[in-house]
Image (cartoon, rainbow, N blue to C red):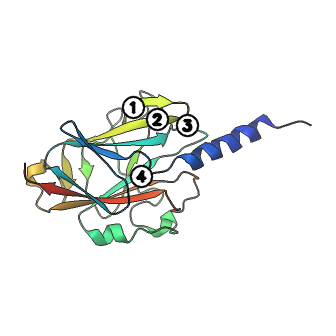
Amino acid sequence: MKINLSFLIAISSILLLTNCKSTANIAIHQNKKKVSIKKNDQIVSITKSPFSFYFNINKYTKTSPVVAKLAAFSNKNDLDALKVGLNVSQTECFALGDALALRPITGYDALFILDYGFHALYYENSLDKSVELIYEKDDFANVAFHINQLFTNGQYIPFEAYKLPKIYIALFIDANTNNTIDEEELTKFSIQFINK
């Protein structure tokens, strides 16, 4: 019996992608402190200063183009509108073509707080990436998205200039690439700013 090698590779890729869940190992790092995101709707308290998102993702390849989509909102209603079962075309932020522009090699220079669009977070190699590689194992990568400033109301601002007490975050990894928000592919949480 002959077994088609490309069929086996495709099945293996699907199984690996299905095992990569957005809620696995998401953490916020700030000033050498780490807070893990353990459940949806979690509130993480940090100071108004630079921080980083750390999470696991499948390495991006031409045959397995998985991208983590991170959206940041100032209004909780935008976060609440994202639900399991929605096709990405039914969302204001995760639809095909809604990726925010990024700088070559350096990636994003701020966390964009908008009611549309997403940060396309991926790692293929040291030149093709929008996040920093922390470590890799097989087809998976642990990556960091560093936030040094914010972008809101059409302008870049330092953290201390942000007037609202919270930022609402949605991280969507379409592990099976079906353009639908499935169970365990979407993690929603809030960042609450506290005084130092």
Rendered location of residue 96, percent (x, y): 48, 57
Crowd around label 4: few <14 · some 14–19 · many ≥20 (10 Å): many
Using the image, tell me which numbered label, if any, was put on residue 61: 3
Using the image, tell me which numbered label, if any, was put on residue 125: none
> Which type of secondary structure does the marked residue at label 1 adopt?
strand
In-front residue for pair 3/62: 3
What's the amino acid at mark 4?
Lys
> Which type of secondary structure does the marked residue at label 2 adopt?
strand
What's the amino acid at mark 1?
Leu
Q: Which residue is mark 2?
A: 141
Up/down of 104 relative to 174, above or below: above
Residue 130 visible in the picture: no
Q: Tell me how far mark 4 sits from mark 3, CA to CA.
A: 16 Å
In-front residue for pair 66/98: 66
Q: Which residue is mark 1?
A: 133
Instruction: Decide which of tag 1 and tag 4 comes sooner along the chain.
Output: 4
User: Is mark 4 in CB contact (under 8 Å) with mark 2?
Assistant: no
